[in-house]
Image (cartoon, grey):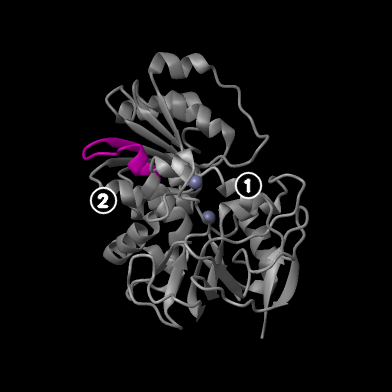
């Protein structure tokens, strides 16, 4: 039996490769991809912002166990696992040995980025990423069973957006009664609002698109700042000061993904506050930032690109508990067959869809 996996050789081009399904080594799992989403990172890849080398797209997925390697009887949390079970894998591996893994910040594992940059479909076991019919889960890679009440369309973003913002808000130590400002009401932003709300925080959301503002409200935002009404940074700073008794929010979460948003975050946050930077992932995009602003405001900047792998289980539990509280089922608003991934990424790039799912 054969499977298919995608590759982006350069901006706005996609190729599909076909391979025999690989042997599953002891401790590994071969998953059948049920759904995989076009995340912001795939849009950046599609635009060619990840550099000149080709990349393998796809990391958000929900799947079914296709084959268990020898010795695998449970998921990472010890729940029994059999063929056909619905699962969500962490889309990367951490080494457990480097300085960051040893100190409990596996999200910053020094081996992770190196491995991801080298992936090409030709190298076995071929199914390295999730714009594919199958996905190879290596021994030691975290994988969790999906709770029964969490449908596929909701579970498919748990292993990226939700786990990452959950981890990011923990890193920032968001506490009851704090004010959290979230820049950008896309996938990461909406998940961040729900988690911040569950922590008892007051949530302010900034966006400039009507539908996204409506969703922010539905995902727990207490206050909305519409960029069309407040078109400049100065105007938004003024509005945020009004909403926060002149101080500024305790925490700002940057998930808008443009460099100017980071500059604005440092300006918006209160003196002594925390800025969680997650949205900017394109190398080479810059903004002029006076470092003295960070100094004099005593701002703590926390960079978060992934998450400690066990956060995926927390994310799945959060979904199981809040599935009826927030309109998670609306987050994926377009579906395409895998073969039409190019169209899905184009439409995502033009923001004609919020979150597109590919169905292999
Ligand atoms: Zn993602
Ligand atoms: Zn490590």
107 or 300, nearer to the observer:
107
> Residue 252: x percent and y percent?
40, 34
Circle number at residue 26: none
Q: Quadrant of the N terminus?
A: bottom right
Disc 1: residue Cβ within 8 A of ligand 2's nearest atom: no
**17 shown above or below 318:** below
Q: Position of residue 298 (x, y in %)?
A: 38, 19
Q: Residue at x 32, y 72 (%)?
A: 79
Is 272 located above or below residue 118 in the figure? above
Name the side, left or right, on which 206 lies relative to 248. Answer: right
Q: Under tag 1, what secondary structure? A: helix
Between 242 and 264, the one lying in front of the other is 264
Residue at the image position 45 percent from the left and 83 percent from the top: 84
**Does 1 sit left or right of 359 as displayed?**
right
- Is 176 contained in the magenta span? yes
Quadrant position of residue 316? bottom left
The magenta-colored residue range is 168-180
Q: Nearer the viewer, residue 356 or 54?
A: 54
Q: Is the residue marked by circle 2 packed among few (<14), some (14-19), or many (20+) residues within 10 Å?
A: some
Q: Is residue 224 visible?
A: no
- Determine whether label 2 and label 1 are within 8 Å by CB: no
Q: Up-down: is 6 above or below 83? A: above
Q: Nearer the viewer, mark 2 or mark 1?
A: 1
Asked if the stretch drawn in magenta spans residue 101, the answer is: no
Alpha carbon distance from label 2 to label 1: 35 Å
Q: Which comes before the other along the chain, label 2 or label 1?
A: 1
Work out which quarter of the rendered image holds the C terminus and state it. Answer: bottom right
Q: Position of residue 83 (x, y in %)?
A: 45, 83
Q: Residue at x 64, y 64 (%)?
A: 344
Find residue 145 and report its horizontal and vertical position in percent.
38, 71
Q: Which residue is mark 2?
A: 198
Residue of label 1: 114
């Amino acid at each position: 039996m054969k499977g298919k996996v995608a590759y982006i050789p350069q901006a706005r081009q996609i190729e599909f490769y076909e391979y025999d399904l690989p042997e599953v080594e002891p401790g590994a799992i071969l998953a059948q991809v049920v759904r995989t989403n076009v995340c912001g990172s795939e849009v950046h890849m599609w635009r060619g912002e990840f550099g000149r080398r080709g990349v393998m797209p796809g990391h958000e997925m929900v799947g079914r166990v296709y084959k268990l390697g020898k010795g695998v009887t449970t998921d990472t949390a010890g729940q029994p696992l059999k063929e056909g079970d619905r699962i969500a894998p962490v889309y990367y591996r951490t080494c457990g040995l480097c300085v960051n893994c040893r100190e409990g910040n596996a999200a910053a594992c020094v081996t992770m980025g190196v491995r991801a940059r080298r992936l090409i479909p030709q190298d076995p076991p071929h199914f390295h990423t999730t714009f594919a019919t199958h996905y190879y889960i290596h021994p030691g890679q975290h994988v969790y069973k999906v709770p029964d009440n969490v449908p596929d369309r909701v579970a498919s973003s748990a292993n990226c957006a939700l786990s990452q913002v959950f981890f990011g808000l923990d890193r920032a130590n968001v506490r009851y009664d704090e004010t959290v400002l979230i820049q950008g009401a896309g996938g990461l932003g909406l998940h961040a609002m729900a988690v911040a709300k569950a922590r008892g925080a007051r949530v302010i959301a900034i966006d400039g698109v009507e539908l996204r503002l409506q969703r922010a409200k539905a995902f727990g935002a207490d206050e909305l700042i519409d960029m069309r009404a407040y078109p400049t940074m100065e105007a938004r700073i003024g509005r945020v000061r009004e909403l926060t008794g002149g101080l500024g929010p305790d925490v700002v979460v940057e998930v808008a993904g443009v460099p100017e948003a980071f500059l604005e975050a440092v300006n918006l946050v209160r003196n002594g506050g925390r800025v969680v930077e997650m949205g900017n992932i394109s190398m080479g995009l810059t903004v002029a930032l006076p470092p003295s602003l960070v100094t004099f405001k005593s701002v703590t900047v926390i960079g978060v690109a992934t998450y400690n792998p066990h956060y995926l289980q927390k994310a799945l539990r959060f979904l199981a508990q809040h599935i009826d509280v927030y309109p998670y089922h609306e987050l994926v608003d377009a579906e395409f067959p895998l073969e039409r991934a190019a169209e899905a990424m184009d439409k995502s790039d033009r923001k004609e869809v919020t979150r597109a799912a590919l169905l292999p």
